[in-house]
């Protein structure tokens, strides 16, 4: 298979239309078989549930080319399970988890020419999503849904790649207690847009959201979970029912413990203790691990000893080990890597 003529090493995190996408429709209480199509457009009624009441959920995952030339996907079963949780919370039908993984495999295989080569630093981002497609005018769930998966080759999420980021402690809340912060619903991202545009205008790379109830505890950013490294090299990550259970974060905590022999802790993290950490990073499919150099909390500047030039040493080790597992240079734990072709 001949790869597309793309400048892989200079890709940003954007949308490039690829050849095929997977589409399946839910009607009369059942999902159809689903097909791959070349049609990148979606045609729905003007009153579709997604357009009126934002009944939509999504996932994000990546396909990589390994050192020995295989195309693989990282832990798609966990994305399938999380999407099922998201669907239940928004009263949507679950797309069967085994079918989800099959749909991912079909989409990757059909777009193999767009999977960036090993060593390019890029990957094929996969975006499974689902939305209410039939007319809904009273506030209630739709009866018909569409599940789709498209693929787009991407580079780093943050401009500047591995340069440490500067974050702002946001005055906006991302998720309420007992709300939808723990699922991947489009509505969580719509309500973060004003906050992120404002932060960018003020010169910040991202927002740090605090817990909405007390504004004392670290939650997450708009698109990634936090990892902190203590001065005695322990890996700490915030525990909260209103953050997205990041698959990257869960994998990194395992890697820290089992591969690097580090102590790990998932617990409440107070904003007041952040100044005492040695390193900070954002983790997620898109973010991978992006180092944080500075956090500004209403005039108070918290600068990590790791500085603004490069990743701190422990975040770097976590990054190298995780990406090594994903690219096939480090042996993966059982079941983490799905070989597509
Ligand atoms: N938190 C939010 C709000 C996200 O959108 C994402 C991205 O998926 C993450 C965390 C990271 O999750 P994952 O590692 O599963 O991609
Ligand atoms: C991902 O990491 O896959 C996400 O969905 C985050 C988003 C901000 C791009």
Image (spheres, rainbow, N blue to C red):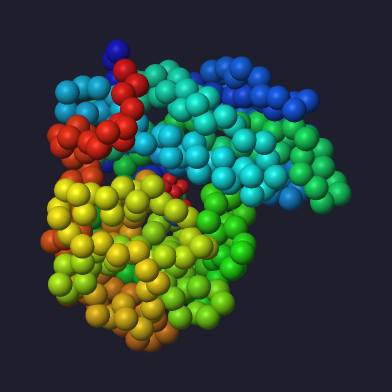
Residue 306: x, y in percent?
17, 70
Residue that protrudes farthest toward the bottom in the picture: 299
Q: At x 78% / y 35%, what residue is drawn?
A: 143
**Depth check, front residue: 155 or 315:** 315
Q: Report if residue 107 is visible in the image.
A: no
Residue 273: x, y in percent?
32, 81
Hey, which quadrant is residue 307 in on the image? bottom left
Hey, which quadrant is residue 234 in on the image? bottom left
Residue 235: x, y in percent?
24, 64
- Vertically, is 136 above or below 161? above
Q: Quadrant of the N terminus?
A: top left
Q: Quadrant of the C terminus?
A: top left
**In the rendered view, does 192 fall on the left or right side of 203?**
right
**Depth check, front residue: 124 or 260:** 260
**In the rendered view, does 111 fall on the left or right side of 117?**
right
Q: At x 82% / y 42%, what residue is drawn?
A: 136
- Vertically, is 214 above or below 18? below
Q: At x 47% / y 23%, what residue is drawn?
A: 102
- Vertically, is 212 above or below 144? below
């Amino acid at each position: 298979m001949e790869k597309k003529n793309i400048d892989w090493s200079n890709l940003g995190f954007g949308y490039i239309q690829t050849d095929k996408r997977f589409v399946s429709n839910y009607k009369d209480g059942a999902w159809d078989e689903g097909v791959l199509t070349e049609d990148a457009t979606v045609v729905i009624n003007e009153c579709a549930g997604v357009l009126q009441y934002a009944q939509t959920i999504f996932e994000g995952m990546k396909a990589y080319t390994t050192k020995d030339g295989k195309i693989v996907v990282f832990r798609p079963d966990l994305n399938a399970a999380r999407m099922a949780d998201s669907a239940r919370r928004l009263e949507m039908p679950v797309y069967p988890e085994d079918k989800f993984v099959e749909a991912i495999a079909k989409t990757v295989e059909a777009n193999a020419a767009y999977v960036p080569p090993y060593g390019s630093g890029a990957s094929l981002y996969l975006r499974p999503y689902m939305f209410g497609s039939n007319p809904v005018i009273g506030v209630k769930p739709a009866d018909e849904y569409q599940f789709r998966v498209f693929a787009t080759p991407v580079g780093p999420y943050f401009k500047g790649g591995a340069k440490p980021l500067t974050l702002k402690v946001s005055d906006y809340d991302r998720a309420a207690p007992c709300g939808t912060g723990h699922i991947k619903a489009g509505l969580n991202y719509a309500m973060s847009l004003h906050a992120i545009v404002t932060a960018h205008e003020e010169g910040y790379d991202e927002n740090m959201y605090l817990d909405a109830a007390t504004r004392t505890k670290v939650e997450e950013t708009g698109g990634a979970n936090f990892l902190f490294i203590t001065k005695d090299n322990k890996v700490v990550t915030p525990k909260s029912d209103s953050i997205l259970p990041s698959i990257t974060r869960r994998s990194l905590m395992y890697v820290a413990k089992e591969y690097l022999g580090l102590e790990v802790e998932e617990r409440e993290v107070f904003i007041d203790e952040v100044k005492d950490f040695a390193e900070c990073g954002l983790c997620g499919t898109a973010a991978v691990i992006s180092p944080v150099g500075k956090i500004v909390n209403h005039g108070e500047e918290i600068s990590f000893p790791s500085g603004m030039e490069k990743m701190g040493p422990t975040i770097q080790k976590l990054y190298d080990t995780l990406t090594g597992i994903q690219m096939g240079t480090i042996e993966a734990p059982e079941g983490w890597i799905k070989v597509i072709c």
